[in-house]
Image (cartoon, grey):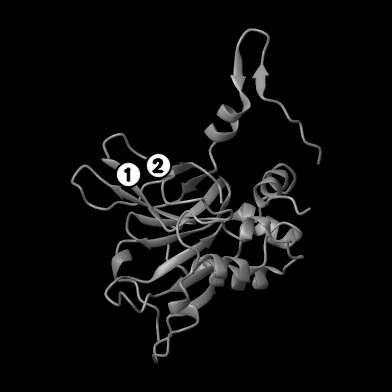
Amino acid sequence: MTQHLWERLLEAKSRLKPVQSKYRVLFEDPATPDEPAKVLVPDPNWMACALEGGILPPIDTYQRDRLVPDGEPKEHPYAEPIGTMTEEEAIEYLVMKDIDPAVWRDYQGNRTILKIVPVEMIPSDRSFRNAWRIAQ
Amino acid sequence: MSTLSVSNISDGTDTVGTSYVVNGSAKAWLQIGNAASTPTINNSLNTTSITDLGTGQFDMTAINGFANNDSSFTASNRSVSTGLGVFTSANGNTKWVVYLRNGSNAYTDYNFSSTVHGDLA
């Protein structure tokens, strides 16, 4: 019987050293074009689980769970875990898990609205944070 | 991994039901630093990522989602005592958002911590 995801996470937290990713995901939401670009920051404990393997569920279980009504049983906590990922594969998994499909799958416009960039490319000066756009 | 099945936990003087401990434990938490420059997650449990939505606005995502949108989401700013603090709300069964404002009610980039109590999916 597959161990519940929560139990695997607790065990991993006690054993694995966090891994700060060298990447960030910069994206814009086509549904809200007036809002600034958003920056997704991977969790270092989650990244450690992704690189280790045998902890995280398949990405398609999260995608099916998006369609499950509030309060109904979800699939992802009980799914068989997947194997090890590279950091790049982990970032792709993260894009599909944490960003709306309208951004990474369904958008058909001409603008580039999603970029995976090294953390050094994200400005540290946030004076004009609410005017950030992805350079075209 | 072995499982210990008990109804109550006792230290010899006080006794508490196991369900109090299981149901009362935080199901996700995280601490955010460098919010005013390059936000990073310093430590966490059961979170996949944060998304910096703009000044003073952050979106958090859980690894193990919650049973419903009725979980208790809390947060506190870790930078100043004069800020108005935070507002949190659920955004689906795996996401929640935190808004941080200063004393003038303007969004501001404070370091913050956030915790979720509730039922897991």
The residue positioned farthest toward the top in the image shown: B13
What is the x, y in percent for residue B32?
47, 48
Residues at discs 2 and 1 both on one chain = yes
For disc 2, the marked residue is B75
For disc 1, the marked residue is B86
- Which quarter of the figure has residue B52? bottom left
Label 2 sits on a secondary structure element that is: strand
Image point (44%, 66%), residue name: A39
- Chain name for mark 1: B
Can residue A59 be seen by looking at this rendering? yes
The residue positioned farthest toward the left in the image shown: B104
Image point (40%, 41%), residue name: B74
Screen quadrant of the N terminus of chain B: top right
- Which quarter of the figure has residue B14? top right
What is the x, y in percent for residue B15?
61, 15
Q: Which amino acid type is shown beneath numbered disc 1?
A: Val
Which is more N-terminal, label 1 or label 2? 2
